[in-house]
Amino acid sequence: MVSIEKMASVLRALPDPAFILSRSGKYVAVFGGSDARYYHDGNGLVGLNINDVVNSEKANWFLQQIKLALASGTLLIQEYELSNKDVKGLPEGGPEQPIWFEGRIQALDFMVDQEDVVLWVASNITQRHEQEIKLRELSDTDQLTRLFNRRKLETDLTLHYETFERHSVPLSILILDLDNLKQVNDTLGHHAGDKMILAVADICREQLRKTDIACRFGGDEFVIVLPNTNLQHAAQFADRLRECFNLALQHFSFDGAEVTVSIGVSTMLPTDRSYEDTLKRADNVLYKAKRNGKNQVVSA
Ligand SMILES: Nc1nc2c(ncn2[C@@H]2O[C@H](COP(=O)(O)OP(=O)(O)OP(=O)(O)O)[C@@H](O)[C@H]2O)c(=O)[nH]1
């Protein structure tokens, strides 16, 4: 059997810190946190209130979680971040990177000074969180251009379609396709073709607003989503964009292969049953632009 005296030593040795917090946010006791890679000694917190330690917005969030854990009686698991700006009394200009924690919060079956209390185990999950963000970025990004990929576009368009259905917020779509890229690949090599695809991606990054979405749809085809934009404005924008692309691409053109851009434009309509209907209309007019001689914008 482990004696009560030895239990104190066991609790001190716990790698993650465990706090006993009262309903009103008082640090009643702190155990563990022995993994010095991730935690400072938390003993100085005992006797303080959460409001003494973090700003009021964060403190209210902590108090809310304590209340929820006490009400449910079951284990509550929450991920949260703490950065310099949240913690009181830290010097300005310290590292800005937030630290991410997983809090496991469990109501205890005794009171301290007539107050309900919880056990709050805080585990530093910053590395895991950063890896998750990197993985998400990788799975949303086209490797060559660093624009979004088709998977991310489809997720975003699904959300936009729901907003359109509910609030009728206009949204337009451009599909653009390079003209004559095959000849460049065949004549100058794939590397030259790649440079053109990259030039188009750079212009998208330069010219688009933060709320617009640019994606490499596949091969030499790109999709640009313009929220809050009607068909007429989208077509005007597409024509300006086409001129920007052409200016950049003319450096790569040669006799027999003038690389330009054709663009199809559509807008979401109340009769559309999904974003795919809107996309299909843009695709149809893109091929009309190709058939009509390329290097032009056609609206659906
Ligand atoms: N360099 C390069 N070429 C690509 C890439 N992806 C697709 N392509 C090429 O892009 C061309 C796309 O086919 P098409 O659209 O029919 O060729 P195009 O000459 O642009 O024809 P039009 O669109 O009718 O003008 C093919 O030759 C593909 O091999 C890529 O990542 N890099």
Image: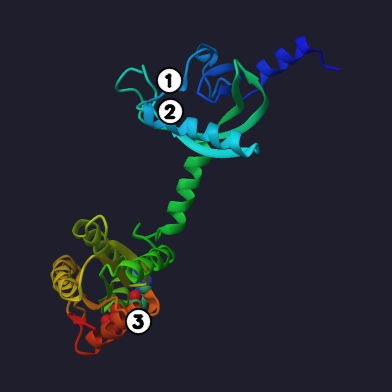
Do labels 2 and 3 touch, CB within 8 Å?
no
Q: Which mark is residue 280?
A: 3
The residue carrying pointer 2 sits among few (fewer than 14), some (14 to 19) or many (20 or more) residues within 10 Å by Cα, namely some
Which mark is on residue 6? none
Dot 2 amino acid type: Ala
What is the x, y in percent for residue 52? 42, 18
Residue for point 48% across, 30% down: 63
Q: Quadrant of residue 299?
A: bottom left
Q: CA distance from mark 2 to mark 3?
A: 50 Å
- Distance from the alpha carbon under mark 1 to that under mark 2: 8 Å
Q: Is residue 247 left or right of residue 92?
A: left
Q: Quadrant of the C terminus?
A: bottom left
Q: Which residue is mark 2?
A: 59
Q: Nearer the viewer, mark 2 or mark 3?
A: 2
Q: Which of the two residues, 256 or 94, is positioned nearer the viewer here? A: 94
Q: Earlier in the sequence, mark 1 or mark 3?
A: 1
The amino acid type, in three-letter code, at marker 1 is: Val
Going by the numbered disc 3, the residue's amino acid type is Lys
Residue 197, can we see it?
A: yes
